[in-house]
Amino acid sequence: MKIISIVGARPNFMKVAPLNKEFSKYSHRVNHKICHTGQHFDEKMSKVFFNDLNLPEPDFYLGVGSGSHAVQTAKIMIEFEKVLLDEKPDLVCVVGDVNSTIACSIVASKLNIKIAHVEAGLRSFDRCMPEEINRMVTDTLSNFLFVSETSGLENLKREGIPNSKVFYIGNIMIDSLVHYLGRVDQSNIMAEYQLKKHNYILVTFHRPSNVDSDSDIQSLVELLNSLSERRKLIFPVHPRTMKKLQGNELVDKMNPNIIATNPIGYIDFLCLMKNAELVITDSGGIQEETTYLGVQCLTVRENTERPATVNIGTNQLVGIDISTIKNAANEVLDGKIKKGGVPKLWDGKTAERIVSILMEKLD
Ligand code: UD1
């Protein structure tokens, strides 16, 4: 049988890498191919992950690049339809909640090709988030819904998705984390930026709702400047965020104790997360990775589609008010830390479970 897995944006690569490895164990039965939509295209947003995660060159590269949501999604759909018409796979495997996920799901479903969605069922209940729309539509169209945390089971049940399509298999991103954690000691990043273990704050921001408006990006720099009086900060800057910082002439207004870098590769970033005293982020995946690592995380959002990281893990949802975030950060720096555990089946074996279910059901 033929299966095509989709990658498009940075958070997809570490989810497809373990699947690719697992499918290769069934090469006598499965012809597994990878399609890269080109949603992310910079060397540091894409290629570095292929190297770090040992992913093969994609079989198909759609080269769609950036654009408005409609333009980006539509371009992916047009190009991916050609691939599906030529290749006629038995299954399209999509991960996460980016525009590539929804676009490829729509195309596959209209051609009556089965879809597996890995990371199904997550809901922030905030339709202002483009990812929420992507998650809902993808789940509606999918034949196999692979769920990473128990909230996903409840959400899909409430939405009337039949139980027979839903599988709790744990968190695929943690497969990559577990696999590569042993290699973080080979990373040179701590020495490169003269960081001391458990004595710096790692910061990432890229959500449109936090960085797109001039006043939000100004408040963000104000927050970072204030925190940098207590600790060194390392801030790998997403291209979207960099554009806004430059547009508002804010890069030079950051205190010298803030190290603003280009986006960082997978292993180096794992190393930074593992050794951080505190992570402040608006990312989805980083909430989960810090929970697994037991590292303190403040999520600068009003909601999360990953409640297990708050209910079980070390994540705290602190909203977007600057003084509340500062207080929460200062508490952690003062030693008031949140103890946390790891959700069920976040154990490095999720890809194994997914592929074994697919092998059984697709026969
Ligand atoms: C996308 C995902 C988001 C995910 C994030 C991780 C959607 C709707 N959003 O957001 O869920 O958390 O990826 O990074 O799919 N850009 C570059 N080089 C690149 C990629 C992007 O310069 O390689 C710039 C472009 O100017 C682009 C902007 O970043 O306009 C945003 O890129 P886009 O893919 O639209 O969304 P992200 O913000 O990266």
Image (spheres, helix red, strand yellow):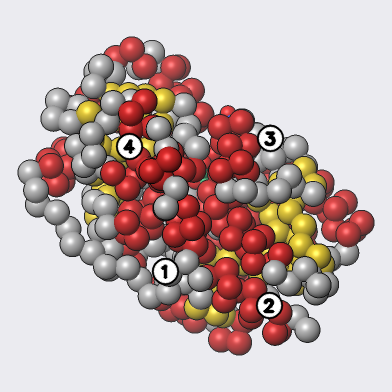
User: Distance from label 1 to label 2 (Cα)?
Assistant: 19 Å
Front position in the image: 84 or 350: 350
Upstream in sequence: badge 4 or badge 1: 4
- The structure residue drawn at horizontal position 7% and vertical position 44%, both measured from the top left corner, is 334
Residue indicated by mark 2: 358
Give the answer, above or below, for where 85 lies relative to 211.
below
User: Distance from label 4 to label 1 (Cα)?
Assistant: 24 Å
Front position in the image: 110 or 234: 234
Front position in the image: 300 or 332: 332
- The structure residue drawn at horizontal position 13% and vertical position 30%, both measured from the top left corner, is 230
Quadrant of the image where one finds ligand 1? top right
User: Distance from label 3 to label 2 (Cα)?
Assistant: 31 Å
Upstream in sequence: badge 3 or badge 2: 3
Please state which amino acid type lies under the numbered disc 1. Trp
Residue 346's disc is 1
Upstream in sequence: badge 1 or badge 3: 3
- The structure residue drawn at horizontal position 26% and vertical position 52%, both measured from the top left corner, is 295
Q: Which quadrant would the N terminus be assigned to in this image?
A: bottom right
Give the answer, above or below, for where 263 lies relative to 284.
above
Image coordinates of residue 4 in percent, x first then y, are 76, 60
Residue indicated by mark 4: 203
Nearest to viewer (mark 3 / mark 4): 4
Upstream in sequence: badge 3 or badge 4: 3
User: Distance from label 2 to label 4 (Cα)?
Assistant: 38 Å
Residue 236's disc is none
User: Distance from label 1 to label 3 (Cα)?
Assistant: 32 Å
Nearest to viewer (mark 4 / mark 1): 1
The residue tagged with tag 4: helix, strand or loop? strand
